């Protein structure tokens, strides 16, 4: 484990999950106000919604996007789309604080030059979960995934290259950032059902920002 001291005295620890994957504890904490403000602005323009999987299930996690491309699912499949299908307009532009944080976190994890063009905003409430999956709709698997947790805690499942590989259970708290890429880029991951909790800044919910270079 390594420690970095930010200007404001916040200590960030790096916790390796395996080759190519790391948790940067509290890395986003110093930007919490600006990040949550930006989440509010994005969700005003492109409201959170429960998307439907190709198999016809409605997702318990509410989602929206910002950036040039947005991840969407419907009965026809998963895809990145420059247009929000609910509004018919482009997704809101990615706030600068998002781009900077994602890029800094990627560098800290050893992935220099990461510039995201897609940010998926997930809202979890107690009881909601995300089943084990791979992120594989992106064009270039040379680019990492940067995933930022805000609000109430969750347990992140981080598995291996196959679905049957045993998953690590990684508790994630407000401000934690997970980065995975290189040999871990296609590893299965998910989120266990959230427990009831309250956070002073978000109430009974967790926001997750997933940054990707999709196009
Ligand atoms: C995701 O895999 O898209 C989100 C993971 C998380 O919420 O931590
Ligand atoms: Fe994912």
Image (cartoon, rainbow, N blue to C red):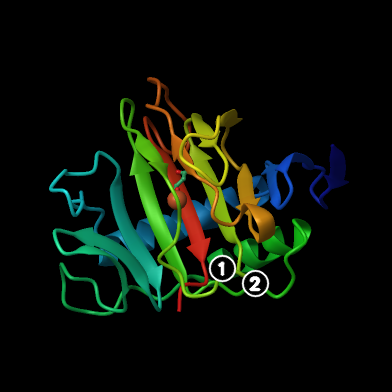
Mark nearer the N terminus (1 vs 2): 2
- Residue 15 lies, in percent from the top left, at 75, 38
Look at the picture and state if 12 lies above or below 203: below
The percent coordinates of residue 64 (x first, y second) are 31, 59
Whole-percent x, y for residue 36 in the image: 47, 52
Dividing the image into 4 quarters, which one contains the C terminus?
A: bottom left
- Quadrant location of residue 40? bottom left
Which quarter of the figure has residue 194? top left
Locate the N terminus by quadrant: top right
- Which residue is at a point 57% across and 66% down the rendered structure image? 97
Residue 128 rendering spot, x and y as whole percentages? 31, 32
Ligand 2 within 8 Å, label 1 CB? no
**Under tag 1, what secondary structure?**
loop
Q: CA distance from mark 1 to mark 2?
A: 12 Å
Q: Would you name the residue on which mark 2 appears?
A: 114
Crowd around label 2: few <14 · some 14–19 · many ≥20 (10 Å)? many
Residue, disc 1? 141
Using residue 77 as the reference point, say whether residue 146 is left or right of it: right
Identified at 62% across, 47% down, the residue is: 177
Q: Quadrant of residue 71?
A: bottom left
């Amino acid at each position: 484990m390594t420690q970095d001291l930010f200007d404001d005295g916040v200590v960030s620890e790096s916790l390796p999950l395996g080759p190519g994957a790391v948790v940067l504890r509290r890395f986003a904490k110093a930007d919490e106000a600006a990040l949550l403000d930006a989440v509010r602005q994005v969700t005003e323009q492109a409201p959170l919604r429960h998307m439907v999987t190709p198999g016809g299930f409605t997702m318990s996690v509410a989602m929206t996007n910002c950036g040039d491309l947005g991840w969407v699912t419907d009965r026809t499949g998963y895809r990145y789309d420059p247009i929000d299908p609910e509004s018919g307009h482009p997704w809101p532009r990615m706030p600068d604080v998002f781009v900077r944080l994602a890029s800094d976190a990627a560098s800290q994890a050893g992935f220099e030059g990461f510039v995201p063009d897609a940010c998926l905003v997930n809202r979890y409430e107690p009881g909601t979960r995300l089943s084990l999956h791979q992120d594989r709709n992106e064009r270039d698997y040379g680019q990492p995934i940067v995933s930022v947790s805000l609000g109430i805690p969750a347990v992140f499942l981080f598995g291996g290259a196959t679905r049957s590989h045993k998953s690590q259970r990684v508790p994630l708290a407000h401000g934690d950032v997970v980065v995975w890429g290189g040999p871990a880029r296609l590893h299965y991951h998910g989120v266990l059902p959230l427990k009831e909790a309250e956070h002073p800044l978000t109430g009974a919910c967790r926001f997750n920002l997933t940054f990707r270079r999709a196009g």
